[in-house]
Structure formats: structure tokens, C-alpha cells
Amino acid sequence: MRRNSLNLRGVITPLFIFFIAIVYQSLSSIYIFLTPLLGLCFYYLYINFDNYEKSFEKFLVVLYLLYFEIDKGFFLGSSIIFFLLLYKLILKPLNSILICQKCLIVSFVAFSYLGYYLLNVVISFIFNLELPSFGLLYFIYIFSDILLVLVLL
């Protein structure tokens, strides 16, 4: 009789990737041209939103997004709120309009960065705080995340 064993590979591999991502996020605070991988995380959550088998991986992505917010000084939980708004209000209708999957990826990553910034501007305005800075670096992040998502697709 064979016992059911715990699938350690299904747990250790995502944890290993998560810890590498945390180290990468810390390095992106030091080296400014390293992208924070916001678009990649949002795209991963988008393609696995209804996949209940990947719940542990989605939980790790949410933890990474929370660490990203803490590290970059954004409002805690705003990325999760923004992703849910983006998914329900924009991506579902956009998915039925756009036939080209790569066009959807490009627009999704661009919406991710620009919309997340605008949400933080609105929150800063509501609470009368200093506005987050916006510059050319955001467009570099958008472009590099689009390339990264297209390559990993």
C-alpha cells in the first residue's frame, strides 16, 4: 500500500521563485533601472484568476505585491484593489473586443502601470499627501515588462 506524500516540488519551486523575486525587488530599490515587475505580476494574476489549483502561487504573488508597495512607499493593498478593479471593469470587456492576444498583453501591462500610478495619485489627493513622482522611468518599466511578458509567454 502506498501512502500519499506531500508534493514538495509544488511548494518548494514557487517559494524559491518568491524569495528570488523578493531579493530582486530589494535590488530594484538600489538599481533604479531594474523594473519592479508589476506588469508581470498583474499578468500572472490575470491568466490564473479562475485557476484554483494555483492558489498558493497567487498568494505568493499577492505577498510580492504587498512587499513592492512597502518597499516603494505606495499605499498598502492598493495594488490588489487596483488589480480587481482593472480585471472586472477593463479586462473583461477588453478581452471580448480585442482578438489579438499580444495586443491585449501590451494594453494590459500599460494599464497596469499607468492605472496603478493614477490610483495612488487619487489616494494621495484624498488624504492630502505628497503625490508620487512620475517620469520617463515608468515608460522604461512598461516597455521592459511588456518585453518580459511576451518572452515568457
Image (tube, rainbow, N blue to C red):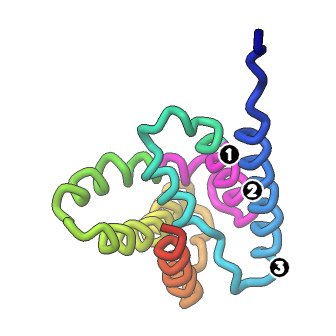
Residue under the point 56% across and 39% down: 54
CA neighbours of label 1 inside 10 A, class few (<14), some (14 to 19), many (20+): some
Give the farthest residue toward the top.
1
Q: Position of residue 102 (x, y in %)?
A: 34, 72
Q: Is residue 42 left or right of residue 21?
A: left
Picture quadrant of residue 104: bottom left
Which amino acid does the dot numbered 1 rest on? Leu
Q: Is residue 111 magenta?
A: no
Picture quadrant of residue 107: bottom left
Whether pointer 1 and pointer 3 mark residues with C-beta atoms closer than 8 Å, the reply is: no
Q: Is residue 74 magenta?
A: yes
* Precedes in sequence: disc 1 or disc 2: 2
* Residue topped by disc 1: 60
Q: Secondary structure at mark 1?
A: helix
* Residue topped by disc 2: 17
Whether pointer 3 and pointer 2 mark residues with C-beta atoms closer than 8 Å, the reply is: no
Residue under the point 62% across and 47% down: 62
Which amino acid does the dot numbered 2 rest on? Ile
- Main SS class of the magenta portion in the image: helix
Q: Position of residue 32 (x, y in %)?
A: 73, 84
Q: Secondary structure at mark 2?
A: helix
CA neighbours of label 3 inside 10 A, class few (<14), some (14 to 19), many (20+): few
